[in-house]
Image: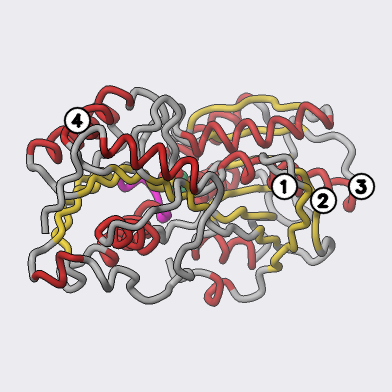
Amino acid sequence: MKKRIFAGLLTAIMAASLVACGGSGSAPAAGGDDSSGGADGKDSGEAIVVGFAQVGHESDWRNASTNSVKDAFSKDKGYDLQFVDCDNDSAKQIEAVRQFIQDDVDYIVIDPIVSTGWDTVLTECDDAGIPVIVIDRTIEDSKKYISWVGSEFMNEGLASGAWLKAYAEAKGIKDLNILVIEGSNGSSAQIGRTDGFKKYADEEGWTILDSQDGDFTQDGGQKVMESYCKSYAGKFNVVVCQNDNEAFGAMDAMKAAGVSYGVDKDVILISFDACKAGLEYVQSGDINADFMCYPLQGEYCAKIIDQLEKGEEVDKQTFMQEPWYVAEDILKDITYTNNAGEEVTEELVQVTDAASQASY
Ligand code: AHR
């Protein structure tokens, strides 16, 4: 059912939800039941039209995210999902949002490829009275959206630094010479993970030999690592890949160059996402630590739309729970200061059965 929220009113709702729900909010349990049971579209028999501008299909994580949104907004659940794979092209993503406005969809969901360049098109959504929900990555230059669901990427980066510091101390490794393979530059995932890790590198005096964009893909990770293996042969003992697919490519490149990696090998290998294949490599000891980025955000997003349909207030931000997975049991937990300035003790999860850890 079309429930147009008029421009201006939408801005007022957003301001109210900012005041009311500044922190993280309640959300359905991961893998929980459909939470959109009371949506008007279902009651009236009319589908709720949701336009989703997805980043692309660059990684295992991304495919899991796409499937999660498709499941949450299925026909059976009373939705008509207009899905656009933006192929990691920011211009295409803005165009997709404009098309959703043209098509007068009920809601727009965006996973922003980059964190800036959004204010104009979000103003157009606001003017059209179409509520926008942002998932996964964040938008830095505009607050013209109703709600965001996703990961605290800075904490993920801090997590990798805090773990490496404690691990190197436990293993008696004094000099850390690090190569970073970054995710797509300009994305909040890349910015947060880079900044969080760099904070530890600066404080601890670690050497970051190089930090290049691997575009969150296996191919990108492999190419960057091939070039690192030539330029920094024999000079590095840590590789940080900003997602699992980059790590898979980096492993292939290191193997070809005769560099060993993983538990008690030449190189400590760190990754992010903790997708099933990544956890299998943690279990086999090829990846030393993998920091989860939780992709199944569709149901959280559906819960927000359900609340909006019922005229309820929604949380401005919903953060995912993201465990730290490790290959060895030499450390039980780590205390670190998160991005909100809170001291948090994180229990490390030793991967003994990757199959039971992830469904994607
Ligand atoms: O925005 C989330 C990141 O994007 C994931 O870490 C990565 O795998 C994806 O491509």
**Picture layout, residue 316 above or below residue 326:** above
* Residue 231 or residue 258, whichever sits in front: 231
The span from disc 4 to disc 1 (Cα, nearest Å) is 50 Å
In the rendered image, residue 337, in percent from the top left (x then y), is placed at: 76, 43
Mark 4 lies on residue: 127
Residue 252: in sight, yes or no?
Answer: no
Mark 2 lies on residue: 167
Tell me the residue at 36%/35% (across/down).
113
Residue range of the region highlighted in magenta in the rendering: 56-61
Q: Residue 268 carries which label?
A: 1
Prevailing secondary structure class for the magenta stretch in the rendered image: loop
Q: How crowded is mark 1: few (under 14 residues within 10 Å), some or many (20 or more)?
A: many
Tell me the residue at 41%/42% (across/down).
16
Q: Quadrant of residue 197?
A: top right
Q: Is residue 345 left or right of residue 67?
A: right
**Picture layout, residue 143 above or below residue 311:** above
Q: Which-is-in-front pick, marks 2 and 1?
A: 2
Q: Which mark is residue 172?
A: 3
* Residue 28 or residue 201, whichever sits in front: 28
Q: Residues within 10 Å of mark 3 (few under 14, many from 20)?
A: few
Q: Quadrant of residue 218?
A: top left
Q: How crowded is mark 2: few (under 14 residues within 10 Å), some or many (20 or more)?
A: some
